[in-house]
Amino acid sequence: MREKLPLALLIIMGLFGLAYRFMPHPGAEAFNSYLRDTLLRIISAFALILGLGNLLLRHAHRIQKREQDWVHSWVLILGFGLTAIIGLLGGVAGEGSLPTKVGNFSFNITDIYNGLLIPLGASMFSLLAFYMASAAYRSFRAKTWLAAALLLSAFIVMLGQVPLGYQISPAIPQVTQWIMEVPNTAAKRGIELGITLGVLATFLKILAGIERSWLGSGR
Amino acid sequence: MSLSTDIWVWIGAFLTFCIYSFLYKDNPLYKFGEHLYVGVANGWSLAFMYLRVIKPVMVQPFGEACRITAQEGLRAELFNPMAPANFLVIIPGLIGCLYFTRFIPGQAWLVRFPIGIFMGYYTGVAVPAVIEGSMFPQMKGSMVTLAKFDAASGGGFWSGIFAIIVLLGVLATLTYFFFSKEHKGITKVGAQTGIVFVMIAFGASFGFTVMARVSLAIGRMVFLLRDWLGIVS
Amino acid sequence: MNWDRFASLDRRYIFLLMALVIIIPILVPMNITMGTMRVTQDLFDTVDAIDRTKQALMISSDYTPQTEAENHPMIIALLRHAFARRIPVLINALYVEGAPLLDQALKQVTAEFNARATSHADSIIYGRDAVYLGWQPPPIVPILSMGQSIRGIYPVDYYGTRTDSLALTQWTHNYDQVGIVVAITSGTSPLWYVMYAQPKYGVKVGGGCTAVNAPDFYPYCETGQLSGIMAGMKGAAEYEALVAEKFDLEDRRKATEAMASQSAAHVLMMVLIVIGNIAFFATRGRKS
């Protein structure tokens, strides 16, 4: 019952999903629209809330147990709480009931997004440029002829991707284009086909009820 | 040089340096920035998700149905799931609430219902999509036809030759990743050819990755030099 | 030469070098010339060929602040192209984290064009020339649902205005009225449109992707499933150049400005790899 009912539900919903592609009947389309636009949209919103709840619980636990860096968990929880309150009560652009402006200083969630999220997010990913340079210097070794082929391909593409390559010779971007359209396409297509077949097999196993790992341990 | 007078730009610059301090070594400023980012991002997502999804799709229709019932009494159309004001919109909410049963000992099995609904539908939609949208077109694109050699159809001699190379490359790559048979004889030749294609492709991917990562660093530097310090226009 | 020092070089020196080669070209602007990749030209031509009286350009985005430097110039260039040709634009966000960035882009380009406009007809009017539909989760829902009704999945736009009150969304019912969907992404959302929307609704799809994912899209460009892509910042710079050249626009081109720093950083990467290899083989030879 605890396994059979959810499994039956999954298979039924899977059949609805399959039918969507093959049944242009207006009734079927309308039903599918309701499933997607209302039922599944709201369920996915609650899944997001679950993820947030997990995150907060994890950090609350860290504070309670005084684990490493527990002080920073307060930063996370306070940041989350303040932003959520300002957003929920202040509105997207400050149109809500909570005032989000003091003098000329505005702090609605759009300002928080522009002032905090963009610098933090962009900075974190931009660290990769530096680490990539360091990793390339320390680890990128042409120990075998295959590694040398990889390096040569990388060098040609790197040069072809920047205006400097074009200024050295217009042939370099053309060779880059050839590398992307022929050997790269061939390899990526082969890899993609393999992945697609594996993914398809997994999907069919899920729909047939053979793959049941999503049911969890059942506690 | 004209320093910015916007408080948020100064906050952004401070946070940028907090994150960049990690390049010297791990330190509390970096951890502060990291945790602040996770907290604010999730708070922001929650607020936006409620204001733009849960409220208009669930709360408002349900509230409107309650208001209509209070004023005019219960009506049949308030149980029409397609109506703008209806009670049935609470059902997905209740199903969504089952996600939280994973925290209740003994009742965690109920979480399988929303997972099953969600995963079932999208798996069903994905099966024909993957076949029609990826597998068949890519297989078709790998095939060498006379049109690839025909200049009138946009091909040509070299287009045809390159199409043959792509086909051989696809087959060789698939052979390389086929581990159910030992790579001996013709399979070995195919696999070794495949690895050459794979290495060239990975080299090209690395070349592109360099540009991607450097782009992000350039973006931050431009912010610091232009928006914060005003050194460049 | 003491290659041992090179082999054990503190990585913080490399970080410093990388920072310098990025900063110096920003401080000392240089004129650069570059070619155009075929995939970028194909995308430009497809967007340019939209019949603006019957179809709109749809820009779908799932990029986030993390990749703003790479993806933002793409949407700016696309909007400039669309507005210069008076192609109506529908914008939607597939991930919530990137939603405000699209609002910024739309406001910036609208302001650029309205600063030059001489009449109401000339101006870019929200609701008539462009609509920002907003964000609805999960990503697959709007991709599938827009095939039947765009207003059905987006009853209100990003700003809370009802879409049935906006002129543009009154005639753009579904993908039939969309000339091409260009998905600006830090992931693989163009492929979601290719797999889910294109087989059933036949909509053309293009992409603007980070350079990391660009090699994965080439097989789809080759089969024609993708009408073209902007591959990374270079792709954005190429598109900016195509738009500026065709429509004689003088607006700031951020991706193009960054190409000098890109060139320098790429050269540094190659030099580092070569020196690293020389140091490795030199010290290995001595040890053996």
Image (tube, rainbow, N blue to C red):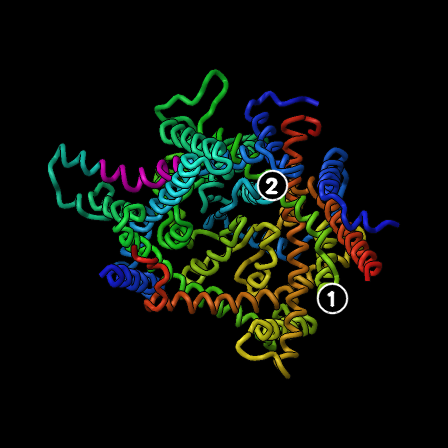
> Badge 1, how many Cα within 10 Å: few under 14, some, many 20+?
few
Snapshot quadrant of residue B164: bottom right
Please state the horizontal and vertical placement of residue B199, each as a whole percent of the image.
67, 65
Q: Residues within 10 Å of mark 2 (few under 14, many from 20)?
A: many
Residue extent of the magenta highlight: B45-63
| For residue C133, above or below residue C208 | above
Of B65 and C149, nearer the camera is B65
Q: Percent position (x, y) of residue B13?
A: 61, 29
- Which residue, as the protein is rendered here, is positioned at the far right? C1
State the quadrant of the C terminus of chain C: bottom right
Q: Which mark is residue A35?
A: none
Query: What amino acid is found at the position of numbered circle 1 in the picture?
Result: Thr
Q: Position of residue C55 (x, y in %)?
A: 46, 50
Between label 1 and label 2, give the one nearer the viewer: 1
B40 up-or-down from A51: above or below? above
Residue at which label 1 appears? A144
As drawn, is B76 to the left or to the right of C193?
A: left
Q: Nearer the viewer, residue C169 or B199?
A: B199
Residue that protrudes farthest toward the top in the picture: A103
Quadrant of the image occupied by residue B149: bottom right
How far apart are labels 1 and 2 at the CA level? 36 Å
The dominant secondary structure in magenta is helix
Residue C69 — which label?
2
Q: Chain of mark 2?
A: C
At mark 2, the secondary structure is helix
**Residue at left offset 66%, top offset 68%:** B197
Chain ID at mark 1:
A
Identify the residue shown where x is 42% and y is 28%: A82
Left or right relative to A28: residue C217: right
